[in-house]
Image (cartoon, rainbow, N blue to C red):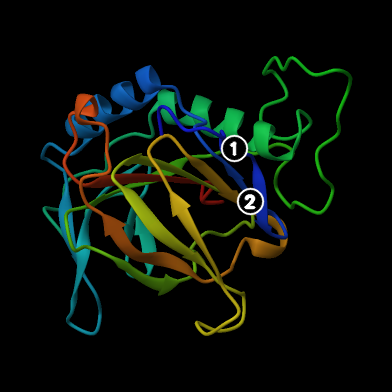
Amino acid sequence: MPGELFPRERSDPAPGAVLLPDWLTFAEQRELVAACREWARPPAGLRTVRLPTGGEMSVRTVCLGWHWYPYGYARTVVDGDGSPVKPFPPLLGTLALRAVADAYGPGAGAHALDHEAAGPVAARPEIAGAAGYAPDVALVNHYAEGARMGLHRDREERVDAPVVSLSLGDSCLFRLGNTETRTRPWTDLELRSGDLLVFGGPSRFAYHGVVRTLPGTADPELGLSGRLNITVRQSGLS
């Protein structure tokens, strides 16, 4: 947040989870908001997800690269208009590779990326899939006021590569739980616009969700109502 007396620092809220505050520049945030508007247009645009239980998610979602539905992936919007899913954007691929490298060391992510490091730093060995990370799917979730996300695990992928999460717009209270149950222990984090959260290794299959959003906390110059979350993953699908 502009004007803060003490800048927020990098933190490791759980083994394998890394929070990098203000990771995106404001220009990058604006670029992503504009891109999300284009990705949200039909066909294969923003949709409300209906769960097998008959309930509906309060967030609205658009998928890129592969179409996610409860609980699998497809090449078409099988639970919507049936259109082919939009391709995975190079913009998100570049950002996700940079994110994994910044979170776990220059040896992670894309080996071709340049990093201004004091010396060679190897990828953290406990983070499965960090070296050679190859993202190919993204979910863009829009949280209007009052929307939330129940605790869940991202387990439809066929690999255990890290998950990259980018926040835009309103802040939220994000709950990072454990890998066994939806109950405690968990850690609550405030995620603000521009923040990067990467979770892999021991936290890759942790339960997580959004307890609530904080309306009115976004910079008005971003031109976004509510919160956008872009989650980038490696599917392991061919």
Q: 210 or 95: which is nearer to us?
A: 210
Q: Amino acid at mark 2?
A: Ala
Q: Quadrant of residue 205?
A: bottom right
How many tags in the picture? 2
Q: Quadrant of residue 206?
A: bottom right
Quarter of the image with the N terminus in it: top left
Q: 7 or 191: which is nearer to us?
A: 7
The mark that comes first in sequence, 2 or 1, is 1
Residue at x 61%, y 74% (from the top left corner): 178
| Vertical order, 60 against 19 (above or below) | below
Q: Which mark is residue 134?
A: 1
Residue at x 46%, y 28% (from the top left corner): 24
Q: Quadrant of residue 203?
A: bottom right
Q: Amino acid at mark 1?
A: Ala
Label 2 – label 1 distance at C-alpha: 8 Å
Q: Is residue 6 left or right of residue 61?
A: right
| Vertical order, 189 against 70 (above or below) | above
Tell me if label 2 and label 1 are in contact, CB under 8 Å.
yes
Q: 7 or 214: which is nearer to us?
A: 7
Q: Is residue 53 left or right of residue 93?
A: left
Q: Is residue 221 left or right of residue 71?
A: left
**Which element carries disc 2, helix, strand or loop?**
loop
Residue at x 38%, y 29% (from the top left corner): 89
Residue tagged by mark 2?
161
- Can the viewer see residue 209? yes
Q: 134 or 3: which is nearer to us?
A: 3
Q: Position of residue 238 (x, y in %)?
A: 51, 47
Q: Position of residue 51 (x, y in %)?
A: 24, 75
- Determine the residue located farthest toward the front in the rendered image: 5
Task: Tell me the crowding category of disc 2: few under 14, some 14 to 19, or many 20 or more residues within 10 angstroms, Cα based.
Answer: many
| Vertical order, 208 against 110 (above or below) | below
